[in-house]
């Protein structure tokens, strides 16, 4: 009797469904939380030494550099720190803004000045109007809920928010498939493939607290509620589903500028569902269902038309895909954004788990066209969803993120079809387990690669930021390259001239010119003018047919700049230094008669380096650690440098530059030798590092400043080397 009761419980559909959901959630949590382990530090240590004890010591030491004082791993990527900082404002100030400033806004076809909530740390010194976005609030409320049960730092709750939201996405896709197919096997395998999709994991793992993760969650949840409004039998559940759909779309609108795509997907599903309802009910003459379906479709179509009429769709695509076209801004910074890179088929496949998984997905697509599947609206809806974002992903990889759920569902539906061939429960269980093991073996190697992701943020940035907090005026301006702007805003609590969301101005043009010029005085003036708000000057003044020196003279006489007394700091870190070659295209003055940068990029079919050929750019090597062997032989990594002969691995150098205690010496300036120079610079104590560079950039200001050379007008105020080299200068007025 007891055995019979137990068998009854175990055979229960609800118990089985709950078990499958628990299993896939466990898999999801395991995959999404692994970045906290800093596995890439482990792998790097293995390449340095084979001695296990030395590996262990190296791992323990290096992991500390990527965790804060509370042993919490730093957030991964720069963008999460924008939302973290705004959430910190909510915790510390009770509001998202840190100031209220007069801003000129367009109102009733005229520009008026209004006092608005401002973010003083972005687009400094002008500041920006604070935009309401859902992500900072999500971090804040997740933090409040977590701390209701257990104390945690804001950095910890921000780190694990993507994991939590990723789990919600897995739950959403599980029930989305369950309510449409009535198959727990399809629901399990769909959510299983999502939990193991490399792109999904890469955008949802711990620490990557960016808009993608919340966009994914809200899109899937809104689609779940929307489709449930069709499928639910109870009228109250239908009504609740409609209300919840509207609420999630409203939140989605404040989460990602491409929010409208979920409306489009709802329209697609409504179309296929309406066609089916009309087809079935015209035969049965069920006028009530015909009317209901028609009203839903008309409402969705009407809303989409309103969006189109107001250019919401077009403007969003322009911004998300290629940015707004302009001839007034120098070399487009979108060219260096990885998410906007075009991909070939092989690269596309890697985002789904490799060529083999891509073949399975194509088989799953073909499965939709089978006779027994042709009349199911959900199948065609998933096919359209996948096809659109897969094609868009070819031109911009960020869209592949939204191709992950439909690809997972397609594979889940395929697995359901395969399991239906087995009528016996035991046989079906064995087959299901076999599919589970097979795809786990295929996908886990790709997931392991994702686990290697770690934070760019490190103790060196935090140390420099704390120093600036304690030793600079609150209105100080930091000149940094745009991709690290959010780090510096967060940890220094000082304003930056550009960041990951504000780089399509003419600041990169001037920053690049200040970096590549050999004229220290010109570089000093440019840095000061950037810090005084050069980005706010109208383009017609900036880009008239004048030399940069003439433009600077004119700006120096401008009333806004003559009164400027901001403390201005220049920060050069390793990442910025190694980007030196890309500054040369940025420093070129645009020609109004030439094609826009976006057009150039599209013509070339690649966003790489803003459309410039990497072979045309100056050469720079990775930075090497160096040790003295004797008085004149130096070993840099595995390369031998003879300082007496001026050779690198026996090859004559154009020049050998040594910067020691701020003093620069140059030897063996041989124009007939190679075009490569070696710059050796001192670290702490008697440690040295070196870099091979093109001779054309050896005297540039960025090389001189990064190597620690004493430069008139540039006062070095801080220097750190672990785990990366960061040099901070105050620009003297």
Image: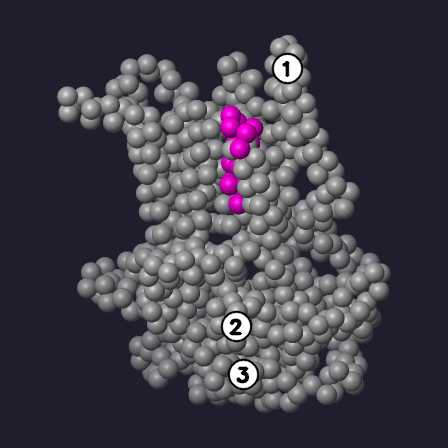
Q: Of callouts 1 and 3, which one flags the residue occurring earlier in the amino acid sequence?
A: 1
Q: Distance between the residues labelled 2 and 3?
A: 31 Å
The circle on residue 729 is 3
Q: Residues within 10 Å of mark 1 (few under 14, many from 20)?
A: few
Q: Residue furthest top?
A: 283
Residue located at (70% from left, 44% from top): 313
- Residue 69's place in the image compared with 241, above or below, is below
The circle on residue 451 is none
Residue located at (53% from left, 80% from top): 705
Residue 41 location, x and y as percent? 33, 60
Q: Of callouts 2 and 3, which one flags the residue occurring earlier in the amino acid sequence?
A: 2
Q: Which residue lies furthest to the right in this view?
A: 109
- Quadrant where the C terminus lies? bottom right
Residue highlighted by disc 2:
93
Residue 523 location, x and y as percent? 64, 80
Span of residues in magenta: 218-236
Q: Is mark 2 on a helix, strand or loop?
A: helix
Q: Residue 224 lies in magenta, yes or no?
A: yes
In the image, 604: left or right of 453?
A: right
Q: Residue 116 lies in magenta, yes or no?
A: no
Depth check, front residue: 275 or 395: 275
Residue 10 visible here: yes
Residue highlighted by disc 1:
286
Q: How far apart are marks 1 and 2 (CA)?
A: 59 Å
Residue located at (42% from left, 20% from top): 417
- Residue 208's place in the image compared with 691, above or below, is above
Residue 246 location, x and y as percent? 60, 42
- Quadrant where the N terminus lies? top left
Depth check, front residue: 22 or 543: 22
In the image, 722: left or right of 326?
A: left
Q: Pointer 1 and pointer 2: residues touching (CB < 8 Å)?
A: no
């Amino acid at each position: 009797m007891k055995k019979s009761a137990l068998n009854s419980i175990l055979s229960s559909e609800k118990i089985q469904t709950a078990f499958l959901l628990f299993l896939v959630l466990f898999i999801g949590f395991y995959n999404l939380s692994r970045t906290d382990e800093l596995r890439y530090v482990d792998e790097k240590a293995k390449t340095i030494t084979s001695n296990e004890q030395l590996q262990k010591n190296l791992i323990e030491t290096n992991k500390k550099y990527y965790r804060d004082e509370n042993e919490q791993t730093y957030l991964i990527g720069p963008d999460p720190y924008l939302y973290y900082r705004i959430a910190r404002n909510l915790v510390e100030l009770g509001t998202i803004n840190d100031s209220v400033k007069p801003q000129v806004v367009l109102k009733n076809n005229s520009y008026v000045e209004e006092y608005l909530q401002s973010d003083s740390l972005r687009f400094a010194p002008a500041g920006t109007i604070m935009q309401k976005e859902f992500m900072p609030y999500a971090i804040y409320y997740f933090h409040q809920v977590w701390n209701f049960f257990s104390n945690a730092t804001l950095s910890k709750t921000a780190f694990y928010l993507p994991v939590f939201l990723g789990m919600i996405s897995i739950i959403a896709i599980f029930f989305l498939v369950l309510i449409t197919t009535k198959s727990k096997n399809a629901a399990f395998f769909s959510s299983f493939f999502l939990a193991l999709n490399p792109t999904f994991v890469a955008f949802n793992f711990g620490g990557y607290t960016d808009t993608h993760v919340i966009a994914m969650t809200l899109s899937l949840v809104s689609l779940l509620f929307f489709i449930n409004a069709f499928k639910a039998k109870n009228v109250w559940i239908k009504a609740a589903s409609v209300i919840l759909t509207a609420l999630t779309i409203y939140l989605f609108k404040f989460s990602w500028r491409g929010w409208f795509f979920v409306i489009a997907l709802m329209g697609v599903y409504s179309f296929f569902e309406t066609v089916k309802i009309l087809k079935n009910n015209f035969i049965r003459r069920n006028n009530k269902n015909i009317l209901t379906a028609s009203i839903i479709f008309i409402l969705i179509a009407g809303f989409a038309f309103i969006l189109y009429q107001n250019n919401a769709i077009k403007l969003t695509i322009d911004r998300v895909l290629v940015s707004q076209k302009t001839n007034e801004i120098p070399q487009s910074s979108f060219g260096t954004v990885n998410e906007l890179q075009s991909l070939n088929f092989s690269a596309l496949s890697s985002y789904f788990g490799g060529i083999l998984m891509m073949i399975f997905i194509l088989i799953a697509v073909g499965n939709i066209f089978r006779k027994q599947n042709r009349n199911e609206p959900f199948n065609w809806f998933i096919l359209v969803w996948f096809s659109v974002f897969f094609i868009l992903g070819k031109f911009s990889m960020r869209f592949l993120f939204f191709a992950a759920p439909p690809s997972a569902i397609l594979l889940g539906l395929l697995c359901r079809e395969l399991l239906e061939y087995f009528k016996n429960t035991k046989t079906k269980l064995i087959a299901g387990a076999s599919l589970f093991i097979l795809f786990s073996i295929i996908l886990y190697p790709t997931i392991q690669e994702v686990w290697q992701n770690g934070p760019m943020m490190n103790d060196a940035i935090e140390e420099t930021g704390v120093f600036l907090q304690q030793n600079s005026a609150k209105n100080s301006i930091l000149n940094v390259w745009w991709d690290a702007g959010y780090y510096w805003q967060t940890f220094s609590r000082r304003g930056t001239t550009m960041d990951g969301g504000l780089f399509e101005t003419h600041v990169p043009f001037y920053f690049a010119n200040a970096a590549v010029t050999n004229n220290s005085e010109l570089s000093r003036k440019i840095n000061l003018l950037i810090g005084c708000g050069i980005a706010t000057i109208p383009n017609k003044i900036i880009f008239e047919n004048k030399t940069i020196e003439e433009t600077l003279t004119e700006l120096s006489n401008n009333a806004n700049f003559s009164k400027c007394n901001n403390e201005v700091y220049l920060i050069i870190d390793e990442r910025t230094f190694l980007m030196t070659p890309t500054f040369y295209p940025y420093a070129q003055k645009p020609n109004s008669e030439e094609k826009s940068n976006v057009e150039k990029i599209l013509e070339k079919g690649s966003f790489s380096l803003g459309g410039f050929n990497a072979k045309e750019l100056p050469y720079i090597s990775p930075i090497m650690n160096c040790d003295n062997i004797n008085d004149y032989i130096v070993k840099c990594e595995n390369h031998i440098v003879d300082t007496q002969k001026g050779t690198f691995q026996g090859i004559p150098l154009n020049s050998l530059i040594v910067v020691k205690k701020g003093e620069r010496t140059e030897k063996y300036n041989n124009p007939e030798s190679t075009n490569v120079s070696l710059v050796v610079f001192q670290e702490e104590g008697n440690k040295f590092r070196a870099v091979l560079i093109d001779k054309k950039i050896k005297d540039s200001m960025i090389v001189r400043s990064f190597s620690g050379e004493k430069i008139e007008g540039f006062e070095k105020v801080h220097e750190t080397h672990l785990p990366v080299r960061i040099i901070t200068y105050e620009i003297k007025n």
